[in-house]
């Protein structure tokens, strides 16, 4: 629930976002009578991609954009967004616990703080910690597609897109339909999702509710997660408005999440967010938006002894932006301004405040610290279409109140040359910056110590490759190199028995990634094999951590293979195989000897399988994860679930009609 004490503590400057949107809305209203308003979705290589700043600009990025389609999630009986990303793309997903209770997503050697997360193009990344950026109140059943942009995109998406971005796009079509899904499984697992799309001539409504719970696969891995989401699209004549809002309540046992010494950790989090976006224009398109994300966090180091150590955090992020786009023959131009205010009150993070604020729902807890910063960015992007050659260049100028004397400039250039229809070669150069999170700067507990003197992360990225997309097959091959300065890493000190963040003097990642996809169901025949996807990533990372143990250990080799095939009649099977080889060591704790020690990560294979039987309005699922019952860890010393059986049914009413 929202704590109004925090709202009253905001300075007037924090309300600029609201004024900015009102001003932009007036510009739209003034243009609506003379300029046609038409939302644009651009199709590139037969794949629709929605961008953040300007949809055309995003699709013209001459790099790898991986598309994960919602129809594939439906057939796979996927239980969480994190499970999808584990197999479907060349990114590093480090989960703690089952069902994506907490997951860190890293791209191309960056940390989980370096990946920008968006819902329908709205930035929902968490400034407190990247651990919370994947707290998304959108169930898999509601996802139209997931767009994964690999590589830096700071000049287009902002400073948060340091090494990549993930955009979750919710379902949107002309139909009126509803569905319900029920799943049950081992370890007291239960999940339900109810969703509906209601459409009329002018309005489109999307509504979803989800509830998932489990007793846990071992002690202190229980969870309960509730999600709610609503989206409204309005279009009439020359007007288009998009509103969305989501809410999440999460309670979970955090067995060793943040320290191997304390196995009985526990956390309760809750968030809500809302955004409003509009668009107008034909020759000149204007697109303003405003958003607000509110998150609370209550953490216990020992759930059996709450008074031993606990944290309370309340984070609010408000932002607004306005973009202008226009075309001059073969030149597409985009300019825009982005304002984002990030704020926290806490009993642990920030500077001491003179007037402590009571924590709602408690008798004696207070928010005694606070911190806030404002980011203002101006960007411009220009795309030239010259026959088979496409040149995209731009710049972003970024200023942040935490570093007022150091405005940053992000230039970038993308080149793409079409060899023949569906095939192109490309090269990209980009410069990026990322600010320390609130946790990096301030957080302190018995095994972690923040560092207020950290500098922002800085990096230069190069990428080149080739892409092909045909009616049946698609492939891409990419080579990349990232050179970083002041990259933040948390290093372990045996002298103090704790992690602390530092700015690395040297960071370099070099890698190759490839993807190969076949879709045989496009041939119009009932082929035994419907689709196959193979992904492979190799990275070599060199960084100045001397003999210390890093908390941010990266993937060296990752391979995933997914095949979907018919078994008999309307029965399909989906098999997912993955191999992971991680660099580095984890910190473990020997309870008998009461001391810490390091242990290397072991390479491991994972195998998941799903059977689905599709009837007219009913689909029956049987899913088994970790069929091989592999013992493995993704992050820290948190043991992941073994073999886990789940079964469910989906009831679907109505037929989908594309926009």
Image (cartoon, rainbow, N blue to C red):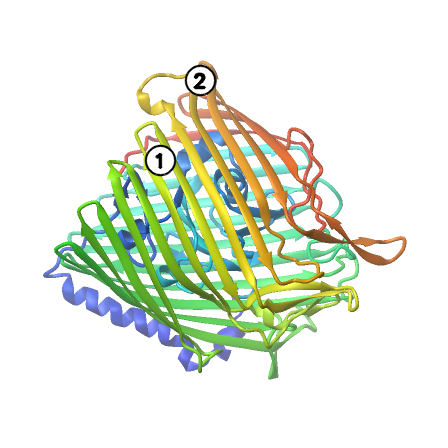
Badge 2 is on which residue?
570
Q: Residues within 10 Å of mark 1 (few under 14, many from 20)?
A: some
The answer to whether residue 206 is left or right of residue 285 is right
Q: Position of residue 464 (x, y in %)?
A: 38, 48
Residue 545 higher or lower than 103, as above or below: below
Q: Could you say whether the residue bearing mark 2 is in a helix, strand or loop?
A: loop
Residue 130 figure quarter: bottom right
Residue reaching furthest to the top = 568
Q: Position of residue 26 (x, y in %)?
A: 22, 69
Label drawn at residue 177:
1
- In the picture, the quarter occupied by the N terminus is bottom right
Could you tell me if residue 35 is visible in this image?
Answer: yes
- In the picture, the quarter occupied by the C terminus is top left
Q: Tell me the distance, in whole angstroms, between the alpha carbons under discs 2 and 1.
A: 22 Å
Query: Looking at the image, which residue is at 76% across and 55% down?
Result: 260
Residue reaching furthest to the right = 592
Residue 425 figure quarter: top left
């Amino acid at each position: 629930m929202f704590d109004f004490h925090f709202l009253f503590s905001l300075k007037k400057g924090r309300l600029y976002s609201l004024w900015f949107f009102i001003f932009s809305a007036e510009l739209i209203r003034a243009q609506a009578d003379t300029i046609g308003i038409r939302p644009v979705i651009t199709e590139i290589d037969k794949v629709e991609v929605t961008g953040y700043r300007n949809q055309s600009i995003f699709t013209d990025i001459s790099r790898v954009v991986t598309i994960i389609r919602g129809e594939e999630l439906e057939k796979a009986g996927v239980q969480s967004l994190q499970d999808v990303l584990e197999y479907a793309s060349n990114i590093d997903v480090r989960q703690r616990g089952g069902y994506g209770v907490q997951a860190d997503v890293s791209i191309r050697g960056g940390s989980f703080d370096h990946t920008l997360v968006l819902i329908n193009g709205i930035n929902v990344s968490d400034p407190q910690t990247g651990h919370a950026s994947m707290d998304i109140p959108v169930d898999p059943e509601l996802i139209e597609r997931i767009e994964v942009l690999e590589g830096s995109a700071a000049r287009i998406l902002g400073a948060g897109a340091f090494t990549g971005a993930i955009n979750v796009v919710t379902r949107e079509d002309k139909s009126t339909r509803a569905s319900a899904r029920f799943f049950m499984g081992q370890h007291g697992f239960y999940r339900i999702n109810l969703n509906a799309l209601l459409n009329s001539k002018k309005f489109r409504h999307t509504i979803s509710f989800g509830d998932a719970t489990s007793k846990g696969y071992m002690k202190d891995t229980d969870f309960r997660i509730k999600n709610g989401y609503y989206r409204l699209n309005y279009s009439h004549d020359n007007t288009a408005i998009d509103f969305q809002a989501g809410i999440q309540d999460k309670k979970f046992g955090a067995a060793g999440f943040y320290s191997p010494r304390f196995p009985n950790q526990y956390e309760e989090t809750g968030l809500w967010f809302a955004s409003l976006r509009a668009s107008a224009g034909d020759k000149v398109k204007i697109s303003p938006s405003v958003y607000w994300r509110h998150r609370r966090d209550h953490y216990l180091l020992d759930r059996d002894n709450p008074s031993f150590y606990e944290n309370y955090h309340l984070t609010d992020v408000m932002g607004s932006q306005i973009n202008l786009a226009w075309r001059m023959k073969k030149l597409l131009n985009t300019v825009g301004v982005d304002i984002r205010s990030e704020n926290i009150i806490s009993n642990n993070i920030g500077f001491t405040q003179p007037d402590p604020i009571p924590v709602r729902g408690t008798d004696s807890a207070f928010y005694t610290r606070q911190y806030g910063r404002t980011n203002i960015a101006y960007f411009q992007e220009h795309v030239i279409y010259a026959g088979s050659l496409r040149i995209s260049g731009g710049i972003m100028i970024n200023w942040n109140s935490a570093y007022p004397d150091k405005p940053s400039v992000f230039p970038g250039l993308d080149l793409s040359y079409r060899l023949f229809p569906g095939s192109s070669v490309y090269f990209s150069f980009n410069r990026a910056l990322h600010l320390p999170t609130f946790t990096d700067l301030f957080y302190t507990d018995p095994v972690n110590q923040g560092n207020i003197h950290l500098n922002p992360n800085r990096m230069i990225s190069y990428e080149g490759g080739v892409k092909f997309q045909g009616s049946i097959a698609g492939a891409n091959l990419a080579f990349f190199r990232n050179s970083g300065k002041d990259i933040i890493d948390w290093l372990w000190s045996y002298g103090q028995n704790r992690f602390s963040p530092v700015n690395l003097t040297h960071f370099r990642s070099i890698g190759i990634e490839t993807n190969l996809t076949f879709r045989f169901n496009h041939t119009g025949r009932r082929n035994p094999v419907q689709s196959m996807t193979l992904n492979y990533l190799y990275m070599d990372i060199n960084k100045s951590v001397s003999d210390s143990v890093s908390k941010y250990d990266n993937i060296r080799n990752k391979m995933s293979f997914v095949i979907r095939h018919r078994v008999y009649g309307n029965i399909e099977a989906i098999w997912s195989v993955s191999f992971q080889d991680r660099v580095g060591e984890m910190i473990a704790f020997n309870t008998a000897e009461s001391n810490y020690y390091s242990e290397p990560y072991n390479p491991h294979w994972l195998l998941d399988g799903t059977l689905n039987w599709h009837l007219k309005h009913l689909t029956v699922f049987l899913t088994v994860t970790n069929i091989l019952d592999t013992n493995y860890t993704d992050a820290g010393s948190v043991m992941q679930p073994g073999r886990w059986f789940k079964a469910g049914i989906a009831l679907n009413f109505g037929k989908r009609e594309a926009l």
